[in-house]
Image (cartoon, helix red, strand yellow):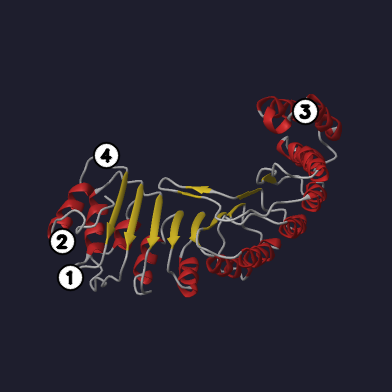
Amino acid sequence: MRFYHVALTITESAWFRLVRALGSIRGLKGLAVAWRNGSPDFHPLQVVARAVDSANSLHNLIISASDSEQSDPAGELSPARSLRQHGNLKDFCLYAHMQTTTRSPQLIPAAACLRQVRIVEHSLTRDDVRCLSRSLSLYKLILEGGVDSWLVIADEIRNGFFRPETLVLVRTTACSALETAEAFQVMIGAIQFNGSLRKLNLYSTTGFSDEMGVALAKALTVNTTLVQLDLQNTFTTSNSTYHPSQPLKAFGAEAYTAFIAMLKINMNIRLELPDLKSDADSETRVQQSLMRIELQLNYADRGSLVASNQTTREEWVNALQRLNDSCEKNEINCGTGSFHLSCVYSML
């Protein structure tokens, strides 16, 4: 239910009854509740808590708030208590359309027992983001917002206060390419010596430059914990898609050369990089093709082959079979038979 009581042309008390009724639906898997500031007696979090208590099968909860909410002194109807007792709840999405920071301390405990949180950040301050990161013990964080959020999260990771296994950062607000590049560099510095992050997704509507690629490759030569890195220019959610808002910067030959050197050392990481631009020069295309060979070998698990000198012949044969299967299933990336042959030659 994404509509406010005003939009529904009903009273606050009727909205309360509607939310409680939705929570009592048998077999309910997902619930989205939205509200705006109302009268002094308008306490929607209490109603959400009651709805969660009633929805024993709930898996996904989205709370969308737009203004401050008074706390429940007794704590008897707090969402924190309800969510902690809710064993089925897997995903909590906090939509932070906030004019003040007074709501953050109330929603943080509610999310503290969850493994995955998505924060749509429109007006959170740096202190809000820092408070959220230190209060959440998460497997996965999806943070949609500006570069300020990236800087805070990078700082929290570098100082060891925030240790998620999967981090998705989406730049959705208007920022210059320079601001994005600076935030990207800070994030690279944070992950270089990080030992907890396993998957990192970065979405930027300004693209990724050669300088970014070279710096990232150097960091991944040191960091061997990260196993999956996705760099994309668009981001799609169930509600909307964020598209590039200006001409994109793209990796060139220098970046791909740096990735080749990195992949020869870091043999376990898997990369998803933006598509090559249609007007890319011939040297960039050659280096990208060579990089894809190294990447294809990582997909065939060559890291496990060279990790020990006791690797059996059967393990090598299985790796070659995986390489063959991968090229057959992904003809767009592998292209011609000569590319496949190059992969096999490099493997051997």
Q: Secondary structure at mark 1?
A: loop
Provide the residue designation for mark 2.
12
In primary-sequence order, the first of circles 3 and 4 is 4
- In 3D space, how far apart are the residues under numbered discs 3 and 4 (Cα atoms)? 47 Å
Q: Residue at x 82, y 41 (%)?
A: 286
Provide the residue designation for mark 1.
39
**Where is residue 317 shown, x and y percent of the image?**
78, 26
Provide the residue designation for mark 3.
320
Mark 2 or mark 3, whichever is nearer to me? 2
**Where is residue 48 shown, x and y percent of the image?**
25, 57
- In 3D space, how far apart are the residues under numbered discs 1 and 3 (Cα atoms)? 67 Å
Q: Secondary structure at mark 4?
A: loop
Of the 4 image quadrants, the one containing the C terminus is top right
Answer with left or right where residue 176 lies relative to residue 303.
left
Q: Are marks 2 and 1 in contact (CB under 8 Å)?
A: yes
Q: Residues within 10 Å of mark 1 (few under 14, many from 20)?
A: few
Quarter-wise, where is residue 329 in the image? top right
Specify the amino acid type for callout 3.
Leu
Look at the picture and state if 160 lies above or below 284. Answer: below
Specify the label residue 164 is tagged with: none
* Residue 195 appears in view: yes
Specify the amino acid type for callout 4.
Gly
Provide the residue designation for mark 4.
27
Q: Secondary structure at mark 3?
A: helix
**Where is residue 137 shown, x and y percent of the image?**
48, 61
In primary-sequence order, the first of circles 4 and 1 is 4
